[in-house]
Image (cartoon, rainbow, N blue to C red):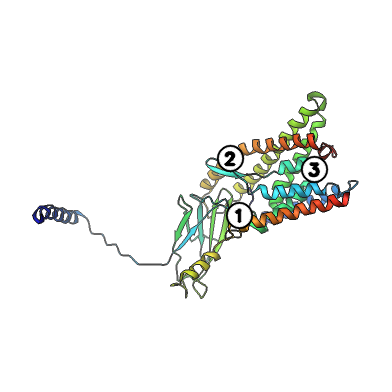
């Protein structure tokens, strides 16, 4: 059994050695960095697929520091420069719909600052910072709010209807 | 259809308020001239509720989805009450669900409210064509047109505002293509809202015709 495996393994090692010999020298290093991931959805829950994203650094709020496009699922990841602390502004836009997010980087409240190695609970609070009105509400909450407002209007209607009589 | 905060420059937002304020004043003055201004309040209040909730009703129009607006319908049934009704409805939508925004409240009110007032006048044309088409047909035709054109005009204003205010940080070509796609999706919505207005007017004619006729 052992011998039957030994021959193919030897072949593979020869092939891989050849490939390495053909390749030109490429040096790739990597470094782990903190990145910010955005998830852009319409309030219907549909992802903003391929929405345009502009990132503005705190140093220059008028010229985009980075522009890009969200993926099919409305996801966009970028790594802000940790040497520029402050509030980073991210604009997501598609067909006149969109939102501006203010993301604090560095400092105590920063995503990349003192809380960089934060627990899950802190991670949640960070993601809440980066959400707009209504995004954090559950469907029952939204439903109850809608019903309350509608009841307000119906009550107003009934009030004036009763006065008329 | 609602323009949220941060999409338009401050000057456009201020211009929106500058138009919305006198139009609200004019509408309220017209309402005050009625014999009993509170008489139509129950109807206006109920339709404000309908307007408030309509934007939560999404209609899939591939590849995107659109939501009901009902501004043409409000104009058709409420007349001058439509503008303040839309303003109140938009305010609640912005505060409760973040749909639209407070800085763009004026712009959104103008975008949906003025077409509603236009729709109200379109619906009045039924009196002109009453002889030619007959009472019932004229009412139905102009109810449909008011509902469809009210929404259509609002959509045209929306696309004009969005296309002329693309910030420099975004690729204008891509954004324009997305806006054109969305504008096409509003064509079937015009038909839906026109039909919806027609059905409501037909229903009111049968159940309580004075609700439509009073302002005739």
The earlier-in-sequence mark between 3 and 2 is: 3
Mark 3, Cα crowd under 10 Å, few <14 / some 14-19 / many 20+, is many
Seen as rendered, the residue at the extreme top is B132
Which residue is found at the position 73% from the left and 41% from the top? Answer: B73
What is the quadrant of the C terminus of chain B in the image?
Answer: top right
Contact (Cβ within 8 Å) of mark 3 with mark 2: no
Q: Nearer the viewer, residue A157 or A8?
A: A157
x then y, percent, for residue B167: 57, 54
Q: Quadrant of residue B207?
A: top right
Q: Position of residue A101 (x, y in %)?
A: 55, 61
Q: Is residue B131 above or below residue B28?
A: above
Which residue bears the numbered disc 2?
Answer: B185
Disc 3: which chain? Answer: B
Q: Secondary structure at mark 3?
A: helix
**Disc 1: host chain:** B
Q: What residue would you read off at disc 1?
A: B7
- Res B116 quadrant in image: top right
Left/right placement of residue B176 relative to residue A79 reads right
Q: Quadrant of residue A30?
A: bottom left
Q: Residue at x 71, y 40 (%)?
A: B150
Both labels 3 and 2 in a single chain: yes
Cα–Cα gap, marks 2 and 1: 21 Å
- SS class, disc 1: loop
Q: Is residue B164 left or right of residue A121?
A: right
According to the picture, the residue beneath numbered tag 3 turns out to be B79
Quick check: marks 3 and 1 in contact, CB under 8 Å?
no
């Amino acid at each position: 059994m052992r011998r039957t495996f030994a021959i193919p393994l030897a072949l593979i090692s020869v092939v891989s050695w050849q490939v390495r010999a053909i390749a030109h020298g490429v040096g790739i290093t990597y470094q782990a960095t903190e990145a910010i991931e955005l998830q852009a959805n319409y309030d219907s829950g549909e992802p903003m697929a391929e929405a345009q994203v502009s990132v503005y650094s705190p140093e220059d709020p008028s010229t985009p520091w980075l522009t890009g496009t969200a993926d099919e699922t409305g996801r966009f990841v970028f790594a802000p420069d940790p040497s520029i602390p402050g509030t980073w502004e991210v604009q997501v836009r598609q067909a006149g719909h969109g939102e501006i997010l203010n993301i604090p980087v560095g400092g105590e409240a920063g995503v990349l600052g003192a809380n960089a190695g934060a627990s899950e609970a802190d991670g949640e609070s960070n993601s809440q910072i980066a959400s707009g009105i209504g995004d954090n509400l559950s469907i029952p909450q939204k439903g109850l709010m809608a019903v309350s407002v509608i009841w307000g209007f119906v009550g107003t209607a009934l009030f004036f209807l009763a006065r008329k009589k | 259809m609602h323009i949220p905060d941060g999409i338009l420059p401050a000057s456009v937002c201020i211009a929106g308020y500058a138009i919305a304020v006198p139009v609200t004043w004019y509408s309220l003055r017209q309402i005050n001239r009625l014999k009993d201004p509170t008489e139509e309040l129950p109807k206006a209040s109920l339709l404000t509720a309908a307007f408030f909730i309509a934007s939560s009703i999404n209609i899939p129009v591939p590849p995107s989805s659109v939501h009901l607006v009902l501004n043409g319908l409000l104009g058709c049934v409420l007349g001058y009450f439509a503008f303040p009704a839309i303003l109140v409805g938009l305010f609640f939508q912005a505060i409760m669900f973040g749909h639209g925004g407070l800085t763009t409240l004026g712009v959104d009110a103008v975008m949906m409210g003025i077409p509603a007032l236009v729709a109200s006048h379109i619906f009045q044309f039924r009196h002109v064509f009453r002889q030619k088409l007959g009472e019932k047909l004229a009412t139905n035709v102009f109810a449909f047109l008011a509902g469809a054109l009210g929404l259509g005009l609002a959509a045209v204003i929306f696309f004009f505002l969005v296309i002329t205010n693309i910030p420099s940080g975004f690729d204008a070509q891509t954004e324009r293509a997305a806006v054109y796609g969305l504008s096409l999706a509003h064509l079937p919505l015009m038909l839906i809202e026109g039909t919806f207005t027609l059905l409501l007017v037909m229903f009111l004619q049968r159940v309580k015709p004075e609700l439509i006729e009073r302002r005739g």
